[in-house]
Amino acid sequence: MNGPATQSAPSIRLRLARRIIRRVIRQAARRGLANNLLTYSDGTQTRWLDPEIDRFLKAMDGEVCRLRSQADLDALPGFGNAVMVELAAWSTAADRSLRHLGVTPKTAHRVVADLGWDVYRRMLRLSSLPARLVTRDPGRRLRWTIRALLVFPFHAPGAPGYAVETWRDGDDILTHFTCCPPQSFVRRVAETEDDPDTLEAFRQSWCTYDWPGADLIAGDGKRSHYRRRRTLSHGDTMCDMCWAARSQGRGSSPHARKT
């Protein structure tokens, strides 16, 4: 399978988004890498200083440019879909660059998951701020924020963009995604380049953020406002998400394979 041969020039707003994303990702990478003990494939461990971090940032810049050729952004319906695939290209580039520099896959996945959460939690804090200012009810906070996110950036016009069925069950809101452009992109890269670690990095990062993300949005000091038993990146037909107004106890682990 080959990626798209050519793509049209990106729009002005996508070019602006790319600049902002690049700056945010690089800042998060500097913060995270300066505080991480990295394990190399030969078993040695070290903490990177500025020269090593600069080398990584240069490698990541080059890798994300290469990965964009497989993103097929022209086929995506909507700006938000393109922004999310751009973010997936950066997280994938970060993981692959770490591994290319000799870091073990396990360490690379952990570092990228932490960097991604640093970025994603900031996005969620901003997106959920209006609801958190208006109401203290965790159910309303979740419902209002999720509905806003389904306008941007998770606009869902259908495949190859986001495809989702949304409904309310009491105070809970359920979102069953059957197509996720970032997951589709990362899976395509993993299969085209015969690199399963690329998809595993996505599973251990993007696919784990909704558990703490739901708790952040609810903002009631409790955990387990989210559950999901099926996941596209695991090969299931959907991500069956439930954003629960009330804590569900411990809930299902974001790392556990559910059937």
Image (cartoon, rainbow, N blue to C red):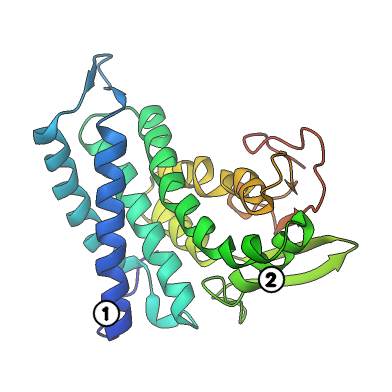
* Rendered location of residue 77, percent (x, y): 50, 83
Q: Please say whether residue 67 is visible from this viewpoint.
A: no
Left or right, 82 with respect to 212, comes to left
Foreground of the two, 243 or 235: 243
- The picture quadrant where one finds residue 12 is bottom left
Q: Residue 6, labelled with which disc? A: 1
Question: Which residue occupies the extreme right position in the image?
Answer: 170
Three-letter amino acid code at the position of disc 2: Val
Residue located 47% across and 79% down the image: 76
Foreground of the two, 111 or 77: 111
- The Cα–Cα distance between marks 1 and 2, rounded to whole angstroms, is 29 Å
Left or right, 52 with respect to 39, comes to left
Above or below, 100 against 94 in this view is: above
- The picture quadrant where one finds residue 86 is bottom left
Three-letter amino acid code at the position of disc 1: Thr
Above or below, 143 against 76 in this view is: above
Residue located 51% across and 71% down the image: 153
Image quadrant occupied by the C terminus: top right
* Rendered location of residue 139, percent (x, y): 78, 58
Give the crowd class for mark 2: few <14, some 14-19, many >=20 residues within 10 Å: many
* Rendered location of residue 34, percent (x, y): 24, 31
Left or right, 226 with respect to 133, comes to right
Question: Which residue occupies the extreme left position in the image?
Answer: 51
Above or below, 49 against 11 in this view is: above
Task: Return the disc, 1 or 2, that comes first in the chain's sequence.
Answer: 1
Give the crowd class for mark 1: few <14, some 14-19, many >=20 residues within 10 Å: few
Name the secondary structure under disc 2: strand
Above or below, 112 against 157 in this view is: above
Q: Which residue is labeled 2 in the image?
A: 164
Name the secondary structure under disc 1: loop
Q: Please say whether residue 16 is visible from this viewpoint.
A: yes
Residue located 38% across and 56% down the image: 192
